[in-house]
Amino acid sequence: ESTDRCWNDVQSALDQGGMTPVDSDRPAGKLYLPAADRDQEGNWFSRLEFWKTGTSIKMARPEVVVRAVSGGCEISANDGNGGTNEGTQAIIDTLYQNINR
């Protein structure tokens, strides 16, 4: 029951903040948000030239992870590759502002 409540509260808070999930994996407790607009990082050709830097470019979708814990919910956000950045902080801020409204 608490897992369902956590899940519903998080989805509602994201919707209220204008961050509607595009996909989910409920057994894993993950909600997937739309990928960031990569066009702001330079033109497509320069991003495809990954062989020059020796690294590949991953187009990941931000994730919100929801877990029920004793006494409430544990919610985290990552960039889809397990990291955090300004975007994941904005997701957390949106959740805090809108949860249980």
Image: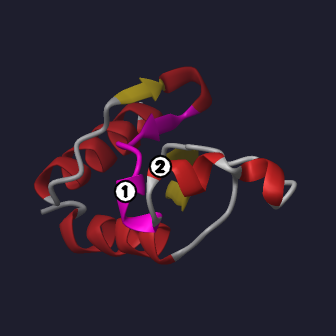
Picture layout, residue 61 above or below residue 53: above
Q: Residues in magenta? A: 29-41
Q: Identify which amino acid the numbered label 2 is placed on.
A: Trp
Task: Please report the residue visible at 27 percent of the width from the left and 69 percent of the height from the top.
Answer: 94
Give the secondary structure at mark 1.
helix
Q: Identify which amino acid the numbered label 1 is placed on.
A: Asp
Q: Nearer the viewer, mark 1 or mark 2?
A: 2
Say how many tags the image has. Answer: 2
Which quadrant of the figure contains the C terminus?
A: bottom left
Residue 71 visible in image: no
Q: Which residue is mark 2?
A: 44
Quadrant of the rendered image containing residue 32: top left
Task: Please report the residue visible at 51 percent of the width from the left and 24 percent of the height from the top.
Answer: 25
- Which dot marks residue 39? 1
Residue 3, image x and y in percent? 46, 35
Task: Please report the residue visible at 61 percent of the width from the left and 29 percent of the height from the top.
Answer: 28
Quadrant of the rendered image containing residue 76: bottom right
Residue 100 visible in image: yes
Residue 66, image x and y in percent? 51, 45
Tell me whether the residue at label 1 lies in contact with that at label 2, contact meaning CB atoms closer than 8 angstroms: yes
Foreground residue, 53 or 79? 53
Q: Is residue 42 left or right of residue 37?
A: right
In primary-sequence order, the first of circles 1 and 2 is 1
